[in-house]
Amino acid sequence: MKKGFGLAGVLVGGVIGITLGVLYAPRAGEETRAMVSERIDEYWGQGKELYDRGVDHMQSTYADVSSKVQDRYSDVSDRFQATRDDVAGQVGAVRDRVKPRVAGANDELRNKIDEARARIASQISKNTEEAGDELRETAPSASASLDDDRYEHWNPAAEWANNDNSDD
């Protein structure tokens, strides 16, 4: 048998029973009203009892579910904490093994960079000396080319002296 009717079934049955009882009552009106009032009180009590049992059941179910959720949360939290601690330990161990290698590689790289800087500075110094020697060799010919007649008309010192310096 299906138990899906619950409180609604009780109330509908009560209303139908009262209606039929009033229609076919062989008793007097006052007596019928008293009987109907008793039945209403009885059904009301049954409905209230069903409601209270439902509330109690829901509260106990809520307490059970809440307790299970809290237990599960605690379990998952503890396992997460243990896993996190384990991973942190493994990361620390790897760090401790890798750190000396990285420091050694860092020192080696720093030495290579310093050597490269020294070679570059030496090469720059050598190139500067060579450029200076070449400039000294070519400078007399450069100053001789200024004596050429092509540049006779241009005298920067004269231009500067002839400029109107009234802005000063």
Image (spheres, rainbow, N blue to C red):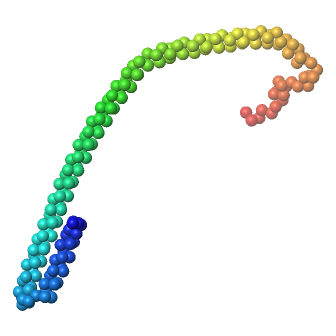
Nearer-the-camera pick, 43 or 153: 43
The answer to which quarter of the image holds residue 126 is: top right
Reply above or below: 1 against 123: below
Toward the front, the furthest residue is 1
**In the rendering, at what x and y percent does residue 49 appear?**
12, 66
Reply above or below: 12 against 89: below
Reply above or below: 30 against 49: below
**In the rendering, at what x and y percent does residue 130 appear?**
75, 10
**In the rendering, at what x and y percent does residue 145 appear?**
89, 17
The answer to which quarter of the image holds residue 53 is: bottom left
Tally of numbered tags:
0
Residue at image coords 33%, 28%: 86
Is 52 positioned to the left or the right of 121 in the image?
Answer: left
- Image quadrant where one finds the C terminus: top right
- Image quadrant where one finds the N terminus: bottom left
Nearer-the-camera pick, 59 or 9: 9
Residue at image coords 94%, 20%: 149
Is 88 positioned to the left or the right of 28 in the image?
Answer: right
Residue at image coords 82%, 31%: 163
Residue at image coords 8%, 86%: 32
